[in-house]
Image: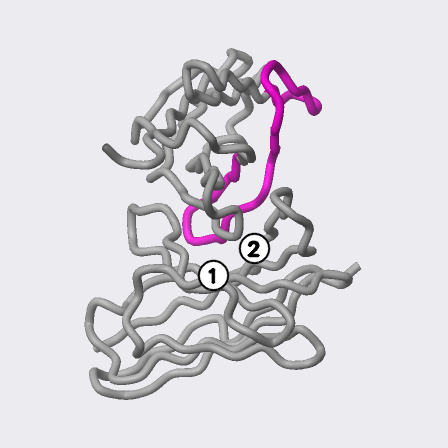
């Protein structure tokens, strides 16, 4: 049973550039959530995708956008990168059931912005 | 007041002892509670989830939930050096069950 996968593992970009991160959910899951984890902090919710639509969004600017494909995989795009965007980006997948969604995390993508 | 609060630690316990990790939350209506373990440089790994008041045991791990006092705890029995990691508490809010709200985590150190 394949778990959540993410690519790439590491990424180095410069300020102002754009980046795309990818996620494939655990087999049987239909919902993908993205989180940003800065050093020494807990993960912060960016947004969640279900049925190819953004269902929920956290307090992140519009520079952060995403997409979900018919096979449930997802992308996170960040435009006009800032130094403060350097973080571990985590994808979590779940099966959408009311109020009891248990989220499983992928290995993450470490983004460094120079 | 933060939505989820944890002592950052480090919590140091000797091998074989019981490690007790605590978490408080502010939303009285929260329904779902999770404990994740995160090794340095790795992603969070789900250890336990609990929805009802009381204790839930899984191997060496016991999650305890007290909704009246708004706290959830994780006990690790027979602690091993391999348990040394950061433990993240996460809850869902009563008015928004789609996202997890995390604490900053407690760093646990188990020494031989």
Whether residue B96 appears in magenta in the rendering, the answer is no
Circle 1/circle 2 CB separation < 8 Å? yes
Dot 1: within a 10 Å radius of its alpha carbon, few (fewer than 14), some, or many (20 or more) residues?
many
Q: Position of residue A22 (x, y in %)?
A: 53, 76
Number of marks drawn: 2
**B38 vs B56, nearest the viewer:** B56
Q: Which residues are magenta?
A: B35-62
A33 or A4: nearer the viewer = A33
Using the image, determine if residue B105 lies above or below residue A92: above
Residue A82: give x, y in percent of width and height.
Answer: 21, 75
Q: Is residue B52 magenta?
A: yes
Q: Which mark is residue A90?
A: 1
Query: Circle 1 sits in a helix, a strand or a loop, which is it?
Result: strand
Q: Predominant secondary structure in magenta?
A: strand
Residue B106 place in picture, x, y as percent: 37, 31
Residue for point 30% across, 66% down: A60
Residue at 21% from the left image edge and 77% from the top image edge: A114
State whether residue B98 is above or below residue A8.
above
Residue A73 shows up from this direction = yes
Q: Chain of mark 1?
A: A
- The residue to which callout 2 is attached is A105
Asked whether A54 or A32 is in front, the reply is: A54
Q: What colour scheme governs how the chains and residues are painted in the rendered image of this protein?
A: one colour
């Amino acid at each position: 049973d394949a778990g959540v996968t993410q690519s790439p593992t590491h990424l180095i970009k410069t300020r102002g550039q754009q980046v795309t991160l990818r996620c494939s959910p655990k087999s049987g899951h239909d919902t993908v959530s993205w989180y940003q984890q800065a050093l020494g902090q807990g993960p912060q919710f960016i947004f969640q995708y279900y049925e190819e639509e953004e269902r929920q969004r956290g307090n992140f600017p519009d520079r952060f956008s995403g997409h979900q494909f018919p096979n449930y995989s997802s992308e996170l795009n960040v435009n006009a990168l800032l130094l403060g965007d350097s973080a571990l980006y985590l994808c979590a997948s779940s099966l959408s059931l009311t109020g009891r969604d248990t989220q499983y995390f992928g290995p993450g993508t470490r983004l460094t912005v120079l | 007041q933060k939505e989820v609060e944890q002592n950052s630690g480090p919590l140091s316990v000797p091998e074989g002892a019981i490690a007790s990790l605590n978490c408080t939350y502010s939303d009285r209506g929260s329904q779902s509670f999770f404990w994740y373990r995160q090794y340095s440089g790795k992603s969070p790994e789900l250890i336990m989830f609990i929805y009802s008041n009381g204790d839930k045991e899984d191997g060496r791990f016991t999650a305890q939930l007290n909704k009246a006092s708004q706290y959830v705890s994780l006990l690790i029995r027979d602690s091993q050096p391999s348990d040394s990691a950061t433990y993240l508490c996460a809850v869902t809010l009563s008015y928004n069950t789609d996202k997890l709200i995390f604490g900053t985590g407690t760093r646990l150190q188990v020494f031989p």
